[in-house]
Image (cartoon, coloured by chain):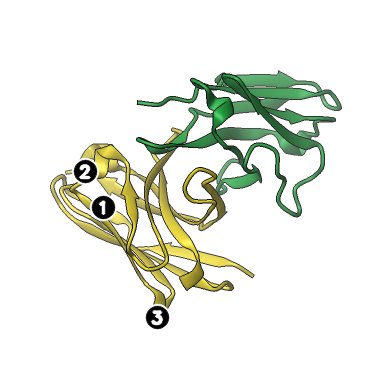
Amino acid sequence: SYELTQPPSVSVSPGQTASITCSGHEVGDKYVSWYQQKPGQSPMVIIYQDNKRPSGVPERFSGSNSGNTATLTITGTQAMDEGDYYCQAWESRAHVVFGGGTKLTVL
Amino acid sequence: EVRLVESGGGLVQPGGSLRLSCAASGFTFHMYWMSWVRQAPGKGLEWVASINYAESENYYVDSVKGRFTISRDNAKNSLFLQMDTLGAEDTALYYCAITQGVPSGTYFQDWGPGTLVTVSS
């Protein structure tokens, strides 16, 4: 079955750039979306179809996808960006696949 | 404003059944694919099922095929998930979500707050 692999945790200092990776076989050939989930809240899409940002999502969030790795980049990370981040893609057999999630800590 | 409100969760014994509902408002429900996504306590997200506008297409994760049935009532702006033969592994918070980009660009645009299903004796 198709798998998307994320690092369990990423730490970043305020104002610095955070990168969260999502690895999968030829994931660059698929569209990847990213979700942010804060404690006690529902997930929220922050990047869809590799690099599109929904209205209302700050410009500091961006996405890229090539080869076997998709990346979510947060430029100028703020304390409010702490939370769990999930990548997600469509695969023809498994249909929808989520990564295991990455806990972002801003310290 | 888009609003999705799930209901129907609760405590059920192993082998039992439960029917979840999702009441939708603030958008043209019958024009969108809809999905259920679940999250076990302290765990990550797992897609469960998706259904198209006319109920003519649906997809399920392998682990629920033959046990869960997704359906919708466009006249009542409602989405449903009939869950049968429940097991402990089905214990999770179940989210209803508006689904865009099906199939290859699938993503979940809006989410409800979820309804908790606990399978335990």
User: Residue A12 location, x and y as percent?
Assistant: 75, 21
Q: Which residue is mark 2?
A: B120
Q: Which mark is residue B11?
A: 1
How far separated are the C-alphas under marks 3 and 2?
Answer: 35 Å
Q: Which residue is mark 3?
A: B75
User: Residue A79 location, x and y as percent?
Assistant: 77, 34
Q: Amino acid at mark 1?
A: Leu
Quadrant in the picture for residue B120: top left
Is label 2 in contact with label 1 (beta carbons under 8 Å)? yes
Q: Colour of chain B?
A: yellow
Parent chain of label 1: B
Which chain wears green? A
Quadrant in the picture for residue A63: top right
Of tags 3 and 2, the one toward the viewer is: 3
How far separated are the C-alphas under marks 2 and 1?
Answer: 7 Å
Can residue A79 be seen here? yes
**Relative vertical location of residue B35 with respect to residue A86 in this rendering, above or below:** below
Quadrant location, the N terminus of chain B: bottom right
Looking at this rendering, what residue extends furthest in the left direction?
B15
- Quick one: SS at disc 2? loop
Q: Amino acid at mark 2?
A: Ser
* Upstream in sequence: badge 3 or badge 1: 1
Crowding near pointer 1: few (<14 within 10 Å), some, many (20+)?
A: some
Parent chain of label 3: B
* Upstream in sequence: badge 3 or badge 2: 3
Left or right: where B67 falls relative to A48 = left
Q: Residue at x 23, y 58 (%)?
A: B18
